[in-house]
Amino acid sequence: MERKDSLLGVIRTLFKWKKFLIITTGIAAIGAIIIVLFLPVYYQAVTIFYAASPDLSMPERIFGTSNEAMEYYGEEEDIDRIQTIAQSNELADFLIDSFNLYEHYDIDKKDLLAGYYVKETFYGQYEVKKTKYDALELSVEDTDPELSAKIANTARRKIDDIAQRLVKESQAQVIATYENSISENQSLLNALNDSLQIVRSKFGVFNSETQSELLATLLAQSEAKLANAEARLEAFQNSNGIPRDTITFQKARVKALQREASTLTAKLDKFNQGMAITDVLTQLHKEATEQISEDQERYKQIKTAYNSYFPAIHLVEEAGVPIIKSRPKRSISVIIATLIAFLLSIVAVLVFDTYKDVNWKEIISGK
């Protein structure tokens, strides 16, 4: 019963102050209407795109030298990278300068905090978020609908440019590494060529396998001829009736064969001395040539990829000029403001009526 009386007392108090409540709420409603009418109208332009896979810029994917299949759409880390670029200061500074947003936002550049204010205003009207379908949605609000669409589309294109530039900078570093490697290997190859020519000229080694077999064969043949000639000479000398000219001729033949065998022996010894180092230099020369060929082929592929266009994003929807405002929601704002004013008026009336008999002066003075 006390609760019912208490509730009736509240209702009685509200009816007692109904005129005040109506006037206060009405004034708040009228004030809210006037305020929202002067609020600037904003239009939101939206562009949607997907992050592209880095595979589109990889030479091994472009030229089919990899066994892995080409991926066209980016993974989670690729989406995060594009989103990071979309929220970077580089992009914000570019858009602010490109569209002269200091003047558009009516911010004085001479102000020490002008840079802070312009970015705060820009980021208040700019948003990039990932959708439930893993696409990226970039939205820009502005009082000028055409400008909002231009900023959104320009931002998307700049994101693509920055993402491409980051990849190309990495490719440029790889290209420089290959250029240095090719230059160093070419210098090594030239040095090996010079060394190989000197060794071949000194030791007469040009084809170790063929020459080794040939010299050994020639020496064996020469020694066999020499042995035969020496045996014939000995037989001629021990036989009677052999003409002196024949014996002299045979002696000359033996000497010639001895000289031939000696020359072949010397060549073979010299050949054997240089064969090992020649084989080593030849193998090094072959390996350096193969390495240069591999590096040059890889260099050409990376250079081609570097000079080729590849998308960093896949466009789904370009930002069109919005025709419907995004804010303010005037009716909702007026209703909320009126409701808040009505509730605060009720609280004020109940507090005032409850404590109207209190001597506030005594309480404040501490008596």
Image (spheres, rainbow, N blue to C red):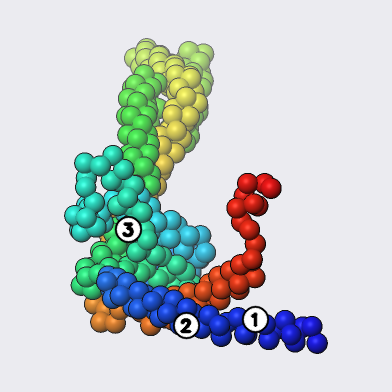
Amino acid on which the number 1 mark rests in the picture: Val
Given contact means CB atoms under 8 Å apart, are the residues at marks 3 and 1 in contact? Answer: no
Residue 138 can be seen in this image: yes
**Closer-to-camera residue (277/306):** 306
Say what secondary structure mark 2 lies in. helix
Furthest residue toward right: 1
Which residue is at 50% across, 65% downward?
75
Instruction: Report the residue at 58% width, 69% height from top.
Output: 352
Image quarter hosting the N terminus: bottom right
Q: For the point 62% across and 49% down, which residue is it?
A: 364
* N-term-proximal mark, 3 vs 2: 2
Q: Earlier in the sequence, mark 3 or mark 1?
A: 1
Residue with the mark numbered 2: 19
Mark 3 sits on what residue? Answer: 122
- The label nearer to you, 3 versus 2, is 2
Q: Indicate whether 354 appears above or below 122.
A: below
Label 3 residue SS: helix
- 295 or 226: nearer the viewer: 295
Picture disc at residue 357: none
Q: Which residue is tagged 1?
A: 10
Name the amino acid, label 2: Lys
